Image (cartoon, rainbow, N blue to C red):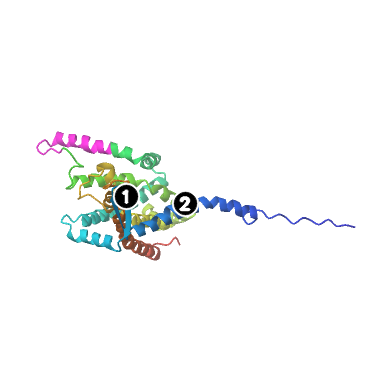
């Protein structure tokens, strides 16, 4: 009598030969892109900070110059009569404060307003998401027309003794105010969707229990919503810190390469270093790379420190 043996079931899933091949092909392109466009580009930027380019007769040559680029930065910082870098640093810090203490709290509040489906919540949802859907240059054009055309006419109609003719052309106060308003408006909606997603993950039973205990809306927001969204808040705050040095605050969109020195940020200043000599001319790349290395050495430790402090002393979901 012959007893038929059952066949051993064939392995399926990620761990058989076919699954490993499929998985490898699936992640090969993202890993390749990461290696080329992140690791390769940033490593090359570090090397550029210690090099110098020359161009004679269309022939480009590079040579190692050690810390010469960093010495040039120190020279500019200490001898520039206009204190350009210090002004850029001050303006960059201003916009970081706006990100951290104006845009983030307002986004969180409006996110909670929409989450609660309060009056006109759907209207605000559409209007606040428009800057994230439509190209920012469209808003730059309309905002520039409104600020430079409509507002001066309205002001001059009621104040003919001291007429104003331009706002972005006044670097002493009005231009910065106009930039800050536009900056808040455009960046306002970017994080609302993330806050809404975080709020949706908070158990409804937790909010109901808080109401049963007699908590009002402010107490629920402070003691339930904020702890529930704290990981998202930390992530967005860290992103704001890490991107501080590259923040142009839409200066190039409004001014091109002619932004007043009193309005410039570090991001705009570095960008102009590169394009001032032509986008195809690498002569200015080493200096821009040196700025990037210096700013990274300053901002990266501060970012990790702030992340540690926020996770260590921030509210807990429990």
Residue 152 is drawn in which quadrant?
top left
Q: Residue at x 40, y 54 (%)?
A: 41
Question: What residue would you read off at disc 1?
Answer: 59
Q: Is residue 21 magenta?
A: no
The image's mark for residue 33 is 2
Q: Which one is nearer the viewer's eye here, 53 or 225? A: 53
Lateral position of residue 150 relative to residue 202, left or right: left
Q: Magenta part of the protein: which range? A: 142-164
Q: Residue furthest front?
A: 57
The secondary structure type at the circle numbered 1 is: strand
Lateral position of residue 72 relative to residue 29, left or right: left
Q: How many marks?
A: 2
Q: Residue furthest right?
A: 1
- Percent coordinates x, y for residue 62 in the rendering: 33, 56
**Is residue 175 visible in this depiction of the protein?**
yes
Position of 165 relative to 285 (above/below) = above
């Amino acid at each position: 009598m012959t007893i038929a043996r059952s066949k051993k079931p064939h392995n399926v899933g990620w761990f058989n030969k076919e699954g490993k091949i499929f998985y490898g092909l699936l992640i090969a392109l993202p890993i390749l892109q990461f290696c080329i466009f992140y690791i390769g580009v940033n490593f090359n930027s570090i090397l550029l900070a210690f090099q110098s380019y020359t161009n004679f007769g269309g022939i480009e040559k590079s040579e190692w110059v050690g810390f010469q680029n960093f010495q040039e930065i120190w020279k500019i910082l200490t001898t520039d009569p206009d204190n350009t870098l210090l002004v850029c640093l001050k303006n960059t810090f201003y916009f970081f404060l706006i990100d951290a203490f104006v845009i983030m709290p307002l986004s969180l509040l409006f996110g909670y307003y929409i989450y609660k489906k309060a009056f006109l919540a759907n209207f605000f949802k559409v209007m606040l998401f428009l800057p994230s859907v439509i190209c920012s240059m469209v808003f730059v054009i309309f905002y520039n027309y409104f600020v430079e055309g409509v507002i001066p006419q309205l002001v001059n109609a009621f104040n003919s003794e001291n007429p104003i003719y331009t706002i972005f052309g006044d670097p002493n106060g009005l231009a910065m105010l106009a930039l800050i308003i536009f900056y808040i408006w455009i960046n306002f909606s970017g994080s609302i969707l993330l806050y809404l997603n975080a709020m949706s993950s908070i158990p409804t039973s937790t909010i109901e229990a808080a109401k049963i205990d007699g908590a009002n809306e402010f107490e629920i927001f402070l003691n339930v919503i904020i702890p529930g969204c704290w990981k998202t808040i930390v992530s967005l705050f860290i992103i704001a810190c890490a991107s501080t040095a590259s923040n142009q605050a839409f200066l190039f969109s409004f001014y091109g390469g002619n932004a007043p020195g009193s309005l410039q940020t570090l991001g705009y200043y570095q960008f102009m270093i590169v394009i001032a000599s032509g986008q195809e001319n690498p002569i200015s790349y080493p200096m821009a790379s040196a700025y990037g290395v210096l700013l990274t050495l300053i901002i990266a430790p501060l970012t990790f420190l702030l992340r540690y402090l926020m996770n260590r002393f921030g509210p807990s979901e429990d």
